[in-house]
Image (cartoon, helix red, strand yellow):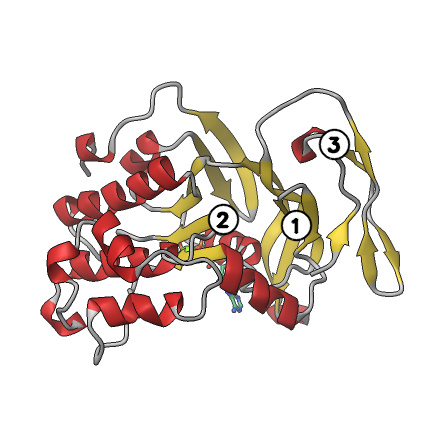
Amino acid sequence: MRQCKSSKKHPCDTHWKRPHRISSLLLYTVMNHSTASPECVFMAQNLTKVYGEGGAAVQALRGVNLRITQGEFVVLLGASGSGKSTLLNILGGLDNATAGTAQWLHQGETHALTGASDAELTRYRREHVGFVFQFYNLIPCLTALENVALVTDIAQDPMRPEDALAMVGLSDRMNHFVSQLSGGEQQRVAIARAIAKRPQVLLCDEPTGALDCATGIVVLQAIEKVNRELGTTTVVITHNAPIARMADRVMRMADGRIVDIQVNPHKVAAASLSW
Ligand SMILES: Nc1ncnc2c1ncn2[C@@H]1O[C@H](COP(=O)(O)OP(=O)(O)OP(=O)(O)O)[C@@H](O)[C@H]1O
Ligand SMILES: [Mg+2]
């Protein structure tokens, strides 16, 4: 993936000039400021996404600006169709923006997600992003351990699959087939699979959407533990507003825009939530 000009100063403390389009490459000029702040993982500026063309065009994102810092737990709320999944998919390298910039920052280097090739995005997803979706997408004919091992076998510096499953409280279910696990257990296997490669970011799109409250809380406790103990930057999309109480910051989307960002002065443990 293309690297933008980087510096020893913190990437979040940069002033961004308008991107210049040169021979189909997006280049960014970064002017560094001196103030220190937590390390930035994602930056998006005027991010726009249009699906389709002409009369059938749907404007899914209408100029999103955001910064997400290392280790943050962000909850993304918003009505159906407000653009949450579209935004998460672009940050996760699953989709391309129509205009604007999205950047991922890692080990002092800034990488442009917008304009990256399919091969670059595939590598980015494989090495740095863990995804958790509403439906678990596990392979039914494999055990929990084998589902996680599918990822660790090809990762660069993975955990042991057993350790990933222990992290989500499934040590005693490792050798069960998917069909022998409850919905909440399957989602926790999906979380173990997502974190086993030690991703820099964990992106969760309605991870509790198919679960009852009690089971959802167990799943959220697993995500909370990963964020706290591994320091994995975490973004969770949810329709359950009470889940926002466990976030460091809550972003609300409406009609393709982030319309509100709130810092939680006191995070609430997942175990204390109900909906
Ligand atoms: N592949 C696509 N083709 C056309 N339109 C799309 C596509 N994906 C999403 N959209 C549209 O883009 C808008 C934003 O969709 P998105 O899935 O991001 O919303 P969301 O906030 O995640 O909604 P939900 O809470 O229902 O999952 C919606 O109007 C949706 O219909
Ligand atoms: Mg969605």
Q: Residue at x 46, y 58 (%)?
A: 157
Q: Quadrant of the N terminus?
A: bottom right
Q: Secondary structure at mark 3?
A: strand
Image height of 99 relative to 95, above or below: above
The residue singled out by tag 2 in the image is 200
**Three-letter amino acid code of the residue under disc 1:** Ala
The residue singled out by tag 3 in the image is 14
- Checking the image for residue 64, the label placed there is none
Residue 78 seen in render? no
Q: CA distance from mark 3 to mark 1?
A: 14 Å
CB atoms of marks 3 and 2 within 8 Å: no
| Residue furthest bottom as drawn | 141
Residue 210 in the image: state x and y as whole percent: 23, 58
Q: Residue at x 65, y 53 (%)?
A: 48
Q: Secondary structure at mark 1?
A: strand
In-front residue for pair 160/274 = 160
**Three-letter amino acid code of the residue under disc 2:** Gln
In-front residue for pair 80/130 = 130
First along the sequence among labels 2 and 1: 1
Horizontally, residue 203 falls left or right of residue 243, namely right
Residue 38 in the image: state x and y as whole percent: 57, 28
In-front residue for pair 51/114 = 114
CB atoms of marks 2 and 1 within 8 Å: no
Q: CA distance from mark 2 to mark 1?
A: 16 Å
The residue singled out by tag 1 in the image is 102
Is label 1's Cβ within 8 Å of ligand 1? no
First along the sequence among labels 3 and 2: 3
